[in-house]
Amino acid sequence: MHLLSRRRVPLISLVSLLSLALALVRPVASYVSADGTVVIPGASSYNGLNLVPQMGWDNWNAFGCDVNETLVLRTAERMVRYGLRDLGYRYVVLDDCWSVGRNETGFLVENPKTFPHGMKYVADTIHSLGLKFGMYSSAGVFTCGRYPGSLGNEQKDADYFASVGADYLKYDNCFNQGQSGTAQISFNRYNVMSQALNRTGRPIVYSLCNWGDDNPYDWAYTISNSGRMSGDVYDSFNRPDSRCPCTEAIGCAWPGFHCSVMNILNKMASIQSRTMSGYFNDMDMLEVGNGGQSDNEYVVHFSMWAMNASPLLIGTNVLTLSPANLAIYSNPAVIALNQDPSATAAVRKWRYFVDPDETGEGEIALWTRSLNNTDQVVALLNAANTSMMMNATMNDIFLDPRTAGAYQAPPQLSETWDVYDLWANRMSNAEAGAIINGTAMNLTANTNSTLTRYNATATSYAQGLLNNDTALLGLKVGSIAPGGTWSAMIPRHSVGLYRLRQRESKVVRRKDEL
Ligand code: GAL
């Protein structure tokens, strides 16, 4: 077992502090540097990390407290073998229930039965696979699973996380001793760990998990890299649940849990402008693969999380992943939306309540998003009970209702746009099955030439987009001329997800410059 009390706690590294300071003051421009780093204008990351949303795996949704070293390390190996690491899923996050208490000097101690080689061994092994390691604690006296929390022990715990080699901390909200209720109180409590992590000198992505309490999207970007904006996700498409009472994010007094995909998605509508490079609204871990939703519903879930720049954390058992679910997690054209250097979330342009299903819920909606290279995303979402012919006019797609009438018409309205279907090249079950069986072609090579695979370790998404890599574009299915309308038949509980690209490469003003 790793005993931290016998080690020297790392002192602040002057070098890393200096480089952090430089990263924060360096004037930024929009480009991809030679080493593939994406540099984003206006990036506001408090610690220079997480300029695009974090991706990875977290055990909680599928395993709860049933965690151990073997599960974590076998999952990490499998993520490499299935090409998930190279698609960008880099963080392997160990959630709650890993510790047995504190040692005589007050440092956290991992459970020797479930983590017999100690946590540093876990981190080292994960690093040797080219992945990063995430850990969990709570800004309370206990974690939600009633293991020791970090409130009052922030620096010791941050030093522990740094000493074992953690690259990421998910920081929960249970047993907070009543230190919540106003933004200032919550900010102060979460800021103690933020400062403590910085003092370790180790780059550690700081992921807040206070379920949207006290509106973290208004303050957490100054001290963290992402913040949960809702109560816990549940593996249900749209089932209402009294344990998740809020339908809006802002001012939600009881975030609760058992929140459906549609409940969390619609909460994003009011806070989309509070997503930014370095701080992402975390819609919670993905349920794709856990069995509670249809294939179409999981496609909606994955698409809308990607579209809204939520962290993408696989929340299922990777060791038993089906070909269909691997194909959803592996769609590079959809992941490229999530990893777009714009770091923006989507706008819900319209929403109509129609045709409810057996849960009593039924709606259709249009979501759009402006991307960094002036491409535009359109999501026609049918959460009603039957197939719908859905339409998006040019005005729907490009006119921002907030500025309508106040400014001249957006120049995008007078252009012709080619439309690419982002799910058209979804990997077949046969191909995904071959990856799972180990009979597919080598995934570690740069396989970017195919339509279904992408290796972001070799070529970043930002660079791939500059290269017009076909795997990131989907399939061209039509175009929209000025004054036109995009129409598509969308099945029940499904989404039509399209990337629109200007036919001529004239430079137009971005929407946020209007
Ligand atoms: C919840 C959190 C979950 C999971 C769980 C662990 O509060 O939202 O994502 O971390 O605690 O007990």
Image: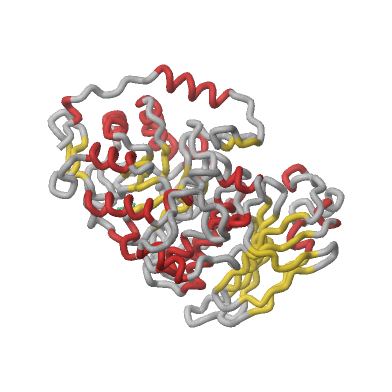
365 relative to 503, above or below: below
* Residue at 57%, 52% in the rendered image: 336
Give the quadrant of the N terminus.
top left
Q: Given the current orientation, which residue lies at the most extreme top position?
A: 14
Say which of 65 and 231 sits in front: 65
Q: State the image coordinates of residue 446 (x, y, percent, origin top left).
A: 50, 48
Say which of 333 and 377 sits in front: 333
Q: State the image coordinates of residue 114 (x, y, percent, origin top left).
A: 17, 49
* Residue at 68%, 61% in the rendered image: 349
Say which of 129 and 314 sits in front: 129
Indicate the quadrant where residue 494 lies.
bottom right
* Residue at 34%, 39% in the rendered image: 127
Number of numbered labels in the structure image: 0
Colour style of the rendered protein structure: secondary structure
Residue 295 in view (yes/no): yes
260 sits left or right of 134 in the view: right
Q: State the image coordinates of residue 264 (x, y, percent, origin top left).
A: 50, 60
Say which of 502 and 396 sits in front: 502
* Residue at 56%, 58% in the rendered image: 450
432 sits left or right of 367 in the view: left
Give the quadrant of the C terminus.
top right
Residue 250 in view (yes/no): no
Q: State the image coordinates of residue 308 (x, y, percent, origin top left).
A: 57, 54
